[in-house]
Amino acid sequence: MHSKLAQLAKRMTEIDALLSREEAARDMDRFRALGQERADIAPVVAGFHDYNRAQADLLAAQEMVADPDMKVLAEEEIHAAKGRIETLEVELQRLLLPKDPNDERNVFLEIRAGTGGDESALFAGDLLRMYMRYAERNRWRTEIISASESDLGGYKEVIVRIEGAGAYSKLKFESGGHRVQRVPETEAQGRIHTSAATVAVLAEADEIRDVKIDPAELRIDVFRASGAGGQHVQKTESAVRITHLPSGLVVECQDERSQHKNRERAMKVLAARLLDRQVREQQTREASQRKSLIGSGDRSERIRTYNFPQGRVTDHRINLTLYKIDQIMDGDLSELTAALTAEHQAELLAALGENG
């Protein structure tokens, strides 16, 4: 670990020298790339400097122990320095964890109603609002890409694009089965019903760099779009359905009046799904060596329950229960996302310990 930290400190000195040169300022792409690299390694290098200072303090205190007049003070300094060194070592290990290359990407968030009929579709609508409010809190931009509304409100299926710094890093653990327990408004007897919806969070793909899509492997159908219950029927065939023949993936887009725009949107969602498939296949291979609780990408897994009568939300992967359902449904997901990220980092550290 220490040799890697020393290399990073050396690299930061090199970057600072490069950034100070006039030539770097002339090449803006190079200038931005160096700036980003510096921002990535700066916290690690700062931690490394703190660690070296703590080591120096420890050595100085150990030299003072021989002096009878300074012995008590020196022992206190030794104890404090050892505590700082231990804390900094754990923090540096965390900072050196391999970064998910998709963390800074925009996302496509797909929500599908599951078991529970109309109540499930209403819950899918509630989840959409929750994520839209969370996006607002993070100052991310949102755009509904495709929506299939149910007759009583809510959604059978909805896809939203979320654009903003760190969107994937904060939302990637939301994929999986979400379950709700509450009394539906249509329930005369006051009985609690259980219904479910599925969430999939897909990192937006760079269609050129990340996935190769052969046009010959696509079947593209156009048809007339219609809203819930046959409303808003369009006279032109602007809706687009793209089938990726090798994988069997199907994407429909009918929200725009332009066939060209619907096709463009559908291609972006298809590329994201293909990238997601690649990522999950890799996770499955890694999970065969070590089961990752959080990042398994298993969409069939029930990850969270929202119990309205008890006012609680439980994340089953980390056994976390929060009695703040109103705040969470209003987009206050910070406590959940922080806990999931911390648990995932702990898993990665444990895996490094096992392999090291």
Image: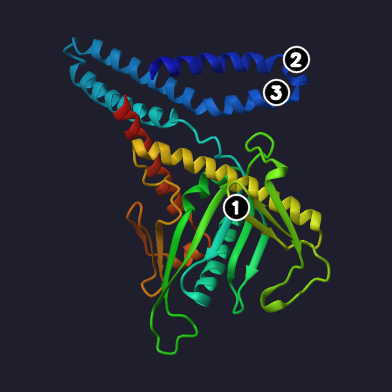
Q: CA distance from mark 2 to mark 1?
A: 48 Å
**Residue positioned 62% across, 78% down in the render:** 151
| Rendered location of residue 351, percent (x, y) | 34, 33
Q: Residue at x 36, y 28 (%)?
A: 88
| Residue at 47% over, 62% down | 328
- Badge 3 amino acid: Phe
**Residue at the spot of label 2:** 23
Visual colour scheme: rainbow
Find the residue positioned furthest to the bottom: 188
Is 25 placed above or below 133 here? above
Asked whether residue 163 is in view, the answer is no
Rendering coords of residue 17 (x, y %): 63, 13
* Secondary element at image label 2: helix
Quarter placement of the N terminus:
top left
Q: Nearer the viewer, residue 336 or 230?
A: 230
Eyeballing the image, is 78 above or below 123? above
Task: Report the residue marked by disc 3.
Answer: 31
Identify residue for label 1. Answer: 249
Residue 267 percent location from the top left of the image = 70, 49
For marks 3 and 1, the one nearer the N-term is 3
The percent position of residue 53, horizontal first and vertical second, equals 39, 18
Q: Is residue 112 left or right of residue 59?
A: right
Distance between the alpha carbons at the discs numbered 3 and 2: 9 Å
Drawn side of residue 127 relative to residue 283, left or right: right
Residue type beneath disc 2: Glu
In this rendering, which labeled residue sits more in front, label 2 or label 1? 1
